[in-house]
Image: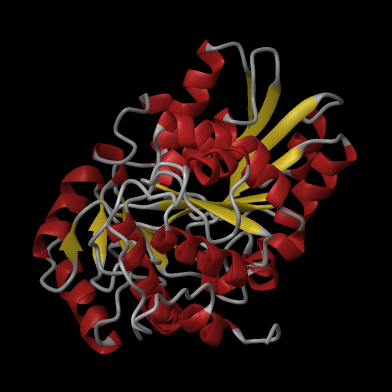
């Protein structure tokens, strides 16, 4: 069948069974593979078939199941799994670019993504940063010869929503490849391929695992890009996903759609409950009509996502009092977990940015990023409300 709906694909796509007919996907915890003959080994190093493997750094049956399943739900021809989300970002960009190339990126990016762009700059890649929400700036920056554009479809942590279709049209008119970090949109709400993205990157550590267990990342794209551009770089530089982690991701995907839809519903309910709260300067959530890119968010995702960002009156001191008063919501720097998690970006995930850059991105001392889990919606709202009383 080729017309399975998303939830069916999340449970069954890419499944490979051994001679034992196991129900749950098997963990092939092996680095190497045995050949029947020297001639077979020689042939496999020239070209591997769909069920042939050489070395776990190149590919593994459990990892391949994960790659095929994420490609099936994302709507791409192929995928390559990596050891972490940042390994996926680094691989997607570095495998494609060389000294003298030009890349245009949104300035509102996760701190480590900005660091990767800095590293590329040191090696001779010209990097131009733009306001991702302004198509005029994209149009002015992307030029003939621009190799790639890079963006987060929803920025971390200020939740700017970029018009992916508009950026793709601008980039493709100049022959540039569009690489989209789609973590906040999640595979559940993603329409990146439909909107024109060429390469889609996920940190599987987030919603795909969904229970804070393992690191992982994945890059989705055409077979040509994945196997001819990305794979040679990743397999030789060692960013392979562990087979055990791939198995965890496969198990996480079975409940991904159910979890994310509940998280998004709770995020919307919380954002609505907090609008106008006297202890908050801002409630940032793409699902609220007052969000600057609400229309685009609804068109691109059909939902506001699973994260709500709050700007607490009183700056860092007040924000810390708020965080410390929470009982259900846990302080950590992950997101997309079944447990609700809160982060103070200015002192953690984005702490290395200079003050002027934080100010430009809207990362104020009072800003906190709240990733909604799957706890009872009413309990979560009550917990946030009581913690705000400590501000």
Q: Residue 27 or 366: which is nearer the viewer?
A: 27
Q: Position of residue 66 (x, y in %)?
A: 46, 64
**Residue 361, visible in the rendered structure:** yes
Q: Residue at x 24, y 49 (%)?
A: 314
**Is 108 displayed left or right of 376 in the figure?**
right
Q: Position of residue 59 (x, y in %)?
A: 46, 49
Image quadrant containing the N terminus: bottom right
Depicted 219 relative to depicted 274: above or below: above
Q: In which image quadrant can residue 308 be found?
A: bottom left
Q: Residue 331 or 279: which is nearer the viewer?
A: 331
Q: Position of residue 380 (x, y in %)?
A: 24, 79
Depicted 136 relative to depicted 215: above or below: above
Disc count in the image?
0
The color scheme shown is secondary structure
**Residue 107, visible in the rendered structure:** no
Q: Position of residue 159 (x, y in %)?
A: 50, 55
Q: Residue at x 72, y 45 (%)?
A: 224
Q: In which image quadrant can residue 75 be found?
A: bottom right
Q: Residue 371 or 337: which is nearer the viewer?
A: 337
**Is 226 displayed left or right of 139 in the figure?**
left
**Is 291 displayed left or right of 118 in the figure?**
right
Depicted 154 relative to depicted 337: above or below: above
Q: Residue at x 10, y 71 (%)?
A: 327
Q: In which image quadrant can residue 71 be found?
A: bottom right
Image quadrant containing the C terminus: bottom left
């Amino acid at each position: 069948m080729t017309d399975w709906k998303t939830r069916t694909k999340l449970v069954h796509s890419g499944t490979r069974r051994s001679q034992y007919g196991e129900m749950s996907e098997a963990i092939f915890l092996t680095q190497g593979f045995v050949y029947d003959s020297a001639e077979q080994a020689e042939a496999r190093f020239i070209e591997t078939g769909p069920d042939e493997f050489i070395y776990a750094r190149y590919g593994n049956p459990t990892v391949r199941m994960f790659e095929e399943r994420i490609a099936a739900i994302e709507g791409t021809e192929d995928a390559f799994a990596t050891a972490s989300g940042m390994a996926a970002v680094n691989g997607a960009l570095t495998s494609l670019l060389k000294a003298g190339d030009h890349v245009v990126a949104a300035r509102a990016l996760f701190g480590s993504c900005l660091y990767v762009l800095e590293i590329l700059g040191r090696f001779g890649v010209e990097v131009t940063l733009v306001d991702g929400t302004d198509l005029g700036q994209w149009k002015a920056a992307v030029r003939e010869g621009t190799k790639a554009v890079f963006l987060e479809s929803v920025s971390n942590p200020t939740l700017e929503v970029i018009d992916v279709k508009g950026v793709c049209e601008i980039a493709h008119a100049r022959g540039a490849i569009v690489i989209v970090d789609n973590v906040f949109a999640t595979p559940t709400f993603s329409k990146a391929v439909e909107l024109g993205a060429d390469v889609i990157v996920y940190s599987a550590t987030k919603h795909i695992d969904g229970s804070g267990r393992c690191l992982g990342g994945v890059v989705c794209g055409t077979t040509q890009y994945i196997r001819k551009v990305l794979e040679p770089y990743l397999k030789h530089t060692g960013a392979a996903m562990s087979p055990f982690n791939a198995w965890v991701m496969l198990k996480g995907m079975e409940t991904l759609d159910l979890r994310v839809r509940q998280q998004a519903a709770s995020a919307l309910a919380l954002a609505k409950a907090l609008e106008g709260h006297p202890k908050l300067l801002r409630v940032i959530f793409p699902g609220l009509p007052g969000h600057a890119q609400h229309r685009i968010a609804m068109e691109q995702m059909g939902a506001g996502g699973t994260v709500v960002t709050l700007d607490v009156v009183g700056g860092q001191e007040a924000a810390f009092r708020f965080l410390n008063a929470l009982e259900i919501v846990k302080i950590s720097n992950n997101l997309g977990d079944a447990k609700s998690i809160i982060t103070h970006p200015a002192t953690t995930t984005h702490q290395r940015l200079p003050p002027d850059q934080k100010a430009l991105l809207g990362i104020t001392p009072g800003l906190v990023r709240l990733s909604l889990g799957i706890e009872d919606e009413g309990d979560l709202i009550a917990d946030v409300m009581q913690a705000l009383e400590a501000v």
